[in-house]
Image (cartoon, grey):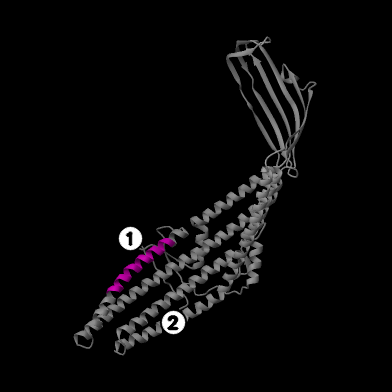
Amino acid sequence: MNRLVVIAMLLCSGGVRAQNVFTIEEIIERAKAQSIFSKQAETQRETSYWQYRSYLTNYNPQLRINGNIPTYANSVTPVRQPDGSIQYLPLNQVNPNINFGLQQPIGLTGGTVSANTSYNFFNDYIQDQSQWSSTVLNVRLSQPVFAYNPLKWDRLIRPVIYEESKREYVEQLEFISSNAAGFFFDVLLQQVNQQIASFNLANNDTIYKIEQGRYNIGTTSQDKLLQVQLQLLRSRQEVAQAKLDLETARLQLRAYIGLKDGDTFELVLPDQIPQFEVTVEEALAYARQYRADYIAFERRRLEAESEVAQAKGQRYQTTITASYGLNNVAPVASELYTDPSRQQVADVSFNVPIVDWGRRKAMMKTALANKKLRDYEIEQSQIIFEQEIITKVSQFEMMRLQIEITKKSDEVAQERYLVAQNRYLIGKIDITNLNIALTEKDNAKRSYLQALKSFWTAYYDLRRLTLYDFANKQLLYVPDTD
């Protein structure tokens, strides 16, 4: 049977509703499009995008305005007199100020250059005096020397983090696909269990009636009749449990793919599996080129080197500052630009430890030790990374063979049971041998579905591990498309 419909779920309250038929591919697409997990992955990708955009603005000029408007004071204030005494005088003043600044970080050196202008106004209502003051223009350079340059290291690390996040998004979608495939086959398996339980109940009921007739005419023993009756009672219990397990599996699938409660559906067992050839070398090559984990190895190395540079930059703290500007004072604002005075400042600030009892040396050694530890961790992660892919690729041929074997076993077990049933009806075998054939038939069906589930989940796991679709021969992620 090429296409086997194994799930039919109808909600009887309010009549029969429209029913959807889903293949495994359609279930997976729904999970990637509307499940809560796909929405979480999409939100995380959006967050990473805006974090990257925020990082880019660190290298752009920033235009800022700040000030205090108005600043008003009306109080009695102690004022020191020329002879050193204190006299309390009334104060009634307004003193607003405003500042404009254009600041540009220097990514190459880690310094900043800025251009600023500021205005202050003072009005003493008691003395009836007012005055304007202004730094008409001030250009300032601040440059750390031998210091840690966060702009330099961010330029190396942040693009890697963003690229890693984009690849993680695609991997997360494949992880969702693998889980959806698992839930898909869980429903199919529980439906088969319900079908098996219902069939066995009807079958055991018939057998019980046959044994009862044989017992009445004395051709079978009471022990065998009780054995069949016990089997009938177990079958009724298995039917009830199978219905509960099926409903649970349906609810789990519905919740995972974001299906509405009012939507009924049936699932179609896939009649084919993806056909492709894959080698370990090919899978490793795609994984190393496109997998998020592999680019994360480089990011972790850069972060370790950044920590060493930061510890090194803290040993000697020196900053060169220079500024040149024009300022003026005038009774009215329009005269501030008339013959302003020069304003020049230059200084070198430093902080060099003389005796720190080895504190900075210990910080440096700690950073170097952490880098060495990080290198070992990355090396171990790479081994685990490659081993996971090698294991997954090695499983595929075995899984294909397992599907062929379990499918053939299912057909043989079905045929054997029919033969055993006919022989039982004519009295050639007893109930024990018939039950053995029945159990083998049921287990063979379950093994076939379990083999299909293992293959499909492993298929999407391989896509996640390599970001390559070997069945359709296409990349799942193309760099530099965003």
Q: Is 338 displayed left or right of 57 in the figure?
A: right
The residue lying toward the viewer, choosing from 114 and 151, is 151
- The quadrant holding residue 442 is bottom left
Magenta segment's dominant SS is helix
> Which residue is drawn at the image coordinates 58% and 73% (left, top)?
394
Q: Are marks 2 and 1 in contact (CB under 8 Å)?
A: no
Label 2: how many Cα within 10 Å (few below 14, some 14–19, many 20+)? few
Q: Is residue 467 visible?
A: no
Count the numbered circles shown. 2
Residue 18 is one of the magenta-drawn residues: no
Task: Judge whether 423 appears above or below 343 on screen.
Answer: below
Q: Please name the residue that numbered disc 2 is placed on.
A: 411
Q: Amino acid at mark 1?
A: Ser
* Quarter placement of the N terminus: bottom left
- The quadrant holding residue 168 is bottom right
Q: Is 414 displayed left or right of 219 in the figure?
A: right
Q: Please name the residue that numbered disc 1 is placed on.
A: 13
Q: Magenta stretch?
A: 233-252
The residue lying toward the viewer, choosing from 117 and 433, is 433
